[in-house]
Amino acid sequence: MTNGIIETAAETGIGTNQPPLTVVTQTFAAEVDRGRQVLDVAVHWIAENGISFLVNILVSLLLLAIGSLVIRMLTKATKRALNRSERINTLLENFLCSLVNKTAWVLLLMIVIQRMGVNIAPLIAGLGVTGFIVGFACQESLGNLAAGMMIAINHPFAVGDFVEIGGIMGTVKELNMMAATLATPDNKKILVPNKIIWGSPITNFTAIDKRRMEIAIGISYGVDIGKARRVALEVLRAHPLVLKDPEPIAEVIAFGEYSVNLVLRPWAAPDDYWSAFFELNRQVKEAFEKNGVEIALPQLDVHMKS
């Protein structure tokens, strides 16, 4: 405590060789005088600028209240306008609404800050430099965001579609501006960045309401091809999940070393694809056995020389 008083006395020019009580009294008087000066400055500033400062605060609060209402109305209007367009999907709609909302808030805050008497020119310059630094440091994230924009605009798939992206097959469970979440057929959850999605071939298996199956089967060379085709077509046409249009076909696709290879091509709805595929493989095999159509097995002819 004594050391603090001595230091304060030294700062105020009071000699330390005087009695301690005198030093304390003189230091206290100096501090009171300094406080009075600060108070005089504050009172003088309030007398000159208090009313305008209070007006600026009230105007700023009013601007914030009105601005928030306008921003809310603007966001809703943007959402309604985007909903009327059939080319705008949910992903792009949410992104554009968020962009409009955040941009409007930045502009409103800049207006309020300027209204309070703060020069925003250095702030804007600082934001520009900061944006450059952040952009350089977040190149991967910005790449994903740009790819997300392209996906949102071109709409190659939607939530619920079964797709193949970069060698990964799965159902799209979630889609945002940075990545897509896929659930694979064996129930794995895979997060694929948008940059990889847009840079790879995209196969959408459910974008069209029809999907063709291809079933390969080999029959022996001694089998009547016409009979084999008739039996296969009867099975395909009788199956409830096989579409009538386009009609299924059963044709010879190749001649193998020990078999005549048939290809069966029925069509089904995307949701029924695998159920129909598995059932048809089993039913065609059973129908061939029932009708005496021999399925070819590998064989080797050996010729003996005496």
Image: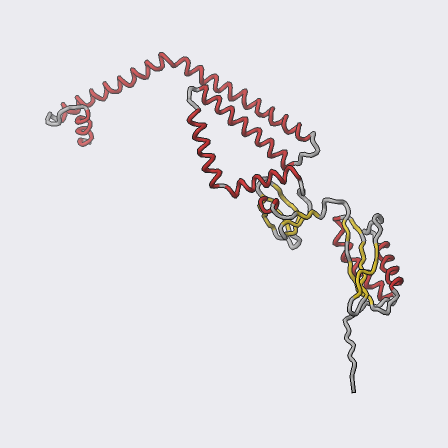
- Where the C terminus falls, by quadrant? bottom right
> Residue 272: where, in percent of width, then height?
76, 50
Q: Nearer the viewer, residue 179 or 23?
A: 179
- The answer to whether residue 298 is left or right of residue 83 is right
Judging from the image, the colouring scheme is: secondary structure
Q: Nearer the viewer, residue 183 or 250?
A: 250
> Residue 270: where, in percent of width, then height?
75, 48
> Residue 304: where, in percent of width, then height?
78, 83
- The answer to whether residue 304 is left or right of residue 136 is right
Vertical position of residue 178 compared to residue 252: above or below: above
> Residue 134: where, in percent of width, then height?
47, 38
Residue 174 lies in quadrant: top right
Q: Which residue extends farthest front?
A: 305
Vertical position of residue 128 compared to residue 205: above or below: above
> Which residue is rendered at x = 86% and y = 60% of the image?
229
> Which residue is rendered at x = 60% and y = 31% of the image?
97
Q: Nearer the viewer, residue 298 or 49?
A: 298
Q: Nearer the viewer, residue 226 or 77?
A: 226
> Which residue is rendered at x = 72% and y = 44% of the image?
207
Residue 2 lies in quadrant: top left
- Where the N terminus falls, by quadrant? top left
